[in-house]
Amino acid sequence: MSPTITAFKLSPDRGKGLARDMPVRWALEEVGQPYEVRLLSFDEMKEAPHRALHPFGQIPTYEEGDLALFESGAIVFHIAQRHAGLLPDDAAARARAITWMFAALSTVEPPIVERSMAVLMERDRTWFEARLPILEDRVRNRLSELSRRLGDADWLEGEFSAGDLLMVSVLRRLKGSGLLEDYANVSAYVARGEARPAYKRAFDDQLAVFTAASSGP
Ligand code: GTB
């Protein structure tokens, strides 16, 4: 039986693939696992049936038989554990790839999200102009550290892994900020991720949901 994930009925990113069902879709495409998608409105996300799956009333969730998961990182990890292709077999290499999954979500993403939230929600505050350069410097710090580590490698640890999948997903949130462009190897890394056939299938599928919903009656 195919797993079912949840996603926005009408994503606020207008199909740019920034909502967190995207890494889950991408992981499922990488391992060749077909899946169903249940689309939810903002109201439906906060209702009891969805809250039973997701305590915070968010997307994505993942259901597979009796197993119900939330948190995109945990879902990608589960998919990577269950199928070949996203984590190396060698125990040490696997541990290093998992380390990059955590690094993406807990070290690289927080300053990126903090900057995006400020740009989206705090533009009209008196202190916004003073705060933005501070937030951008924090992002630049992480990008330069990542750039140094990546060097001229294609991926963070040998072959493409779930660590790269999450890192590329996190870095995509900087599109349009002008920050990524200063780090040529990191920009090329993101482009390499986006060029993967599995990424493209996942992206097209989530875009099709937005296109259908926004052109409906
Ligand atoms: N840590 C959780 C995870 O990784 O799964 C975070 C889940 C989460 O933030 N879900 C968001 C959500 O359900 C959607 S993805 N929000 C509704 C709510 O909280 O009520 C975050 C997101 C939303 C929109 C954009 N965008 O428009 O660009 C990007 C990312």
Image: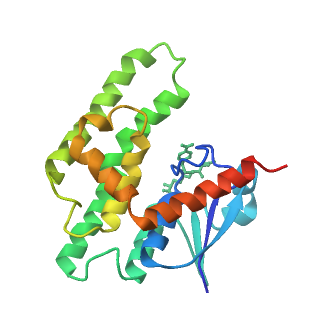
Viewer-closest of 38 and 153: 153
The residue positioned 52% from the left and 55% from the top of the image is 20
Residue 71 visible at all: no
Number of disc labels = 0
Residue 99, by quadrant, is bottom left
166 on left or right of 66 = left
Where 169 sits versus 26, above or below?
above
Q: Quadrant of the N terminus?
A: bottom right
The residue positioned 25% from the left and 34% from the top of the image is 182
Where 181 sits versus 151, above or below?
above
Looking at the picture, how far across and down is residue 195, in whole percent?
38, 58
Looking at the picture, how far across and down is residue 175, in whole percent?
42, 39
Viewer-closest of 177 and 63: 177
72 on left or right of 67 = left
Viewer-closest of 77 and 19: 19
115 on left or right of 215 = left
Looking at the picture, how far across and down is residue 206, in whole percent?
59, 58
The residue positioned 34% from the left and 74% from the top of the image is 86
165 on left or right of 23 = left
The residue positioned 42% from the left and 36% from the top of the image is 114
Residue 100, by quadrant, is bottom left
The scheme the figure's colours follow is rainbow
Q: Find the residue positioned furthest to the top.
A: 126
Where 136 sits versus 213, above or below?
above
